[in-house]
Amino acid sequence: YKYFLSRKDLNVGDLDAIADRLVELGIASKEGDVYSIDLAQLGYQKLLGAGKISKAMQIKVPYATPNAVAKIEEAGGSVITEFEAEFE
């Protein structure tokens, strides 16, 4: 992924493309068919909705667009934003 860590935002399609590599590097985890990725820990501040996603993911990120959340949920995943995490 050519913009890895050079931008503060990431599209769901790009995340789908790099998820396996993040697990290989030990940056993310995978339990069964579900990937767990903390984008804030990677330096990303925003998850955007461009692209297609085919993997179920549990994503933690400071902000996600409604389109990004919808696509993650449609693929069987979930998104926790910073705002939601404050109330857990």
Image (spheres, helix red, strand yellow):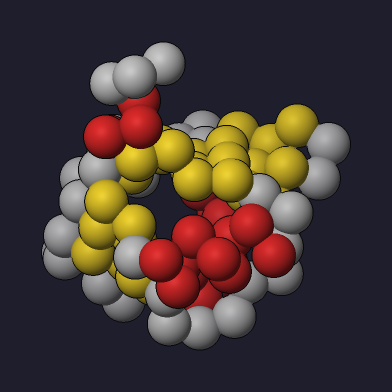
Q: Please state if 84 lies on the left or on the right of 5 as rendered.
A: right
> Can you say which quadrant of the picture contains the N terminus?
bottom left
Pinpoint residue 86: horizontal percent, then vertical percent: 28, 21
Pinpoint residue 32: horizontal percent, then vertical percent: 83, 36
Pinpoint residue 18: horizontal percent, then vertical percent: 52, 63
Image height of 68 relative to 43, above or below? below
> Camera-side residue: 75 or 10?
75
Q: Quadrant of residue 35?
A: top right
Q: Residue at x 59, y 80 (%)?
A: 52
Image height of 53 relative to 61, above or below? below
Q: Farthest residue to the top: give it.
A: 88
Q: Please state if 62 lies on the left or on the right of 58 as rendered.
A: left
Pinpoint residue 48: horizontal percent, then vertical percent: 35, 70
Q: Please state if 71 lies on the left or on the right of 74 as rendered.
A: left
Q: How many marks?
A: 0
Residue 43 visible? yes
Q: Quadrant of residue 3?
A: bottom left
Q: Residue at x 44, y 38 (%)?
A: 80
Q: Quadrant of residue 84?
A: top left
> Camera-side residue: 71 or 12?
71
Residue 14 visible? no
